[in-house]
Amino acid sequence: MSHVTNRDIDNMSPEARKSRLKELREEMLQLQSEKSMGGTAANMGAYKATRRSIARMLTRMHQDRKE
């Protein structure tokens, strides 16, 4: 459940974005710990998707702050 699309982000309220970002960061922390302990190739896809979702979320939050 780590993948978040731009459409999903646009439909979220600012509070929902903050809480989802916190969830994504916690998931990323868990994936990083699994990776450091010799995670499988399947986890690498989740790692990449989570990292990109965090980037999308932060980009949208910064764009809204500038407007």
Image (cartoon, rainbow, N blue to C red):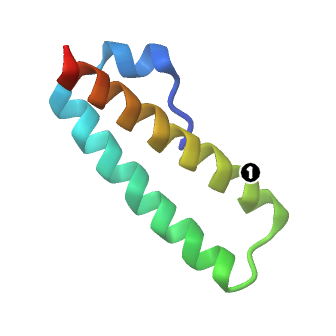
- Residue at left 80%, top 70%? 40
Image side of residue 51 versus residue 17, left or right: right
Q: Is residue 13 visible?
A: no
**x, y percentage for residue 42?**
79, 58
Q: Is residue 67 above or below residue 27?
A: above
**x, y percentage for residue 11?**
33, 13
Give the residue type that dot 1 points to.
Gly
Q: Residue furthest right?
A: 41
Find disc 1 in the rendering and name its residue: 45
Q: Is residue 22 above or below residue 41?
A: above
- Residue at left 50%, top 31%? 4
**x, y percentage for residue 51?**
55, 49
**x, y percentage for residue 30?**
50, 69
Image side of residue 27 versus residue 43, left or right: left
Quadrant assignment for the C terminus: top left
Quadrant assignment for the N terminus: top right
- Identify the secondary structure beneath mark 1: helix
- Residue at left 50%, top 60%? 28
